[in-house]
Image (spheres, rainbow, N blue to C red):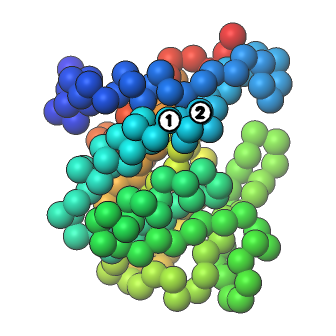
Amino acid sequence: MASQDEQQQQQDPRIPKISSAIRVIPNFPKPGIMFQDITTLLLDTKAFSDTIDLFVERYKGQNISVVAGIEARGFIFGPPIALAIGAKFVPLRKPNKLPGEVISEEYSLEYGKDKMEMHVGAVQAGERALIIDDLVATGGTLSAAIRLLERVGVHIVECACVIELSGLKVCGANLIPLLLPYQSQFV
């Protein structure tokens, strides 16, 4: 049975228009992958605006003080959402990209490990945060973002992504309001 959020998303006429604005590139970056290219969404001002509006409608009035965007495409969606809901934007970056003192969280990749960093003092214990990215595949990056922010005492309200691959529920039931579920990442 679909949740109330899923039912509302299915009924929202903006969703199919947003979905059609995202180009799918077969066999990129390697054979068998169907790459979800959001650059075409960014070229369509109406679809891009509708995407931001859907998130703002969901999060306005939820007392969120932090929108944390995951590098790099979370930097595209996060700042306009943060401005619209009256929150600060905190970039979560790859290693050695932020000057000054940082706190980091290591996470596993398919073939190795990586780290995510943010400035020390960017968030305070007790703040309420939304984590935003363009796409969730395995959930490793989102999980690292959650651990990083929770480690300094931040309460995660939700994780939000524009596209979900393969129907994953990474952060638990109803934690990720996804706009565009995508069924298969393989050709």
Packing grade of label 2 (10 A; few <14, some 14-19, many >=20) is some
Q: Is residue 82 left or right of residue 37?
A: left
**Residue position marked by numbered label 1 in the rendering:** 44
Badge 1 element: loop
The residue at the far top in this view is: 187
Packing grade of label 1 (10 A; few <14, some 14-19, many >=20) is some
Q: Is residue 160 above or below residue 13?
A: below
Residue 55 shows up from this direction: yes
Residue 137 shows up from this direction: no
Q: Please state which of residues 107 and 160 is positioned toward the viewer in this rendering.
A: 160
Say which quadrant the C terminus sits in: top right
Which residue sits at x=26%, y=25%?
A: 13
Q: Please state which of residues 12 and 112 is positioned toward the viewer in this rendering.
A: 12
Q: How many marks?
A: 2
Q: Is residue 68 above or below residue 7?
A: below
Q: Is residue 73 left or right of residue 25?
A: left
Badge 2 element: helix
Say which quadrant the N terminus sits in: top left
**Residue position marked by numbered label 2 in the rendering:** 40
Amino acid on which disc 1 is placed: Asp
Q: Is residue 106 left or right of residue 155?
A: right
Which residue sits at x=82%, y=42%?
A: 111
Q: Position of residue 167 (x, y in %)?
A: 45, 26
Which numbered dot is residue 98?
none
Which residue sits at x=71%, y=50%?
A: 108
Q: Position of residue 55 (x, y in %)?
A: 33, 49
Q: Position of residue 183 (x, y in %)?
A: 50, 18
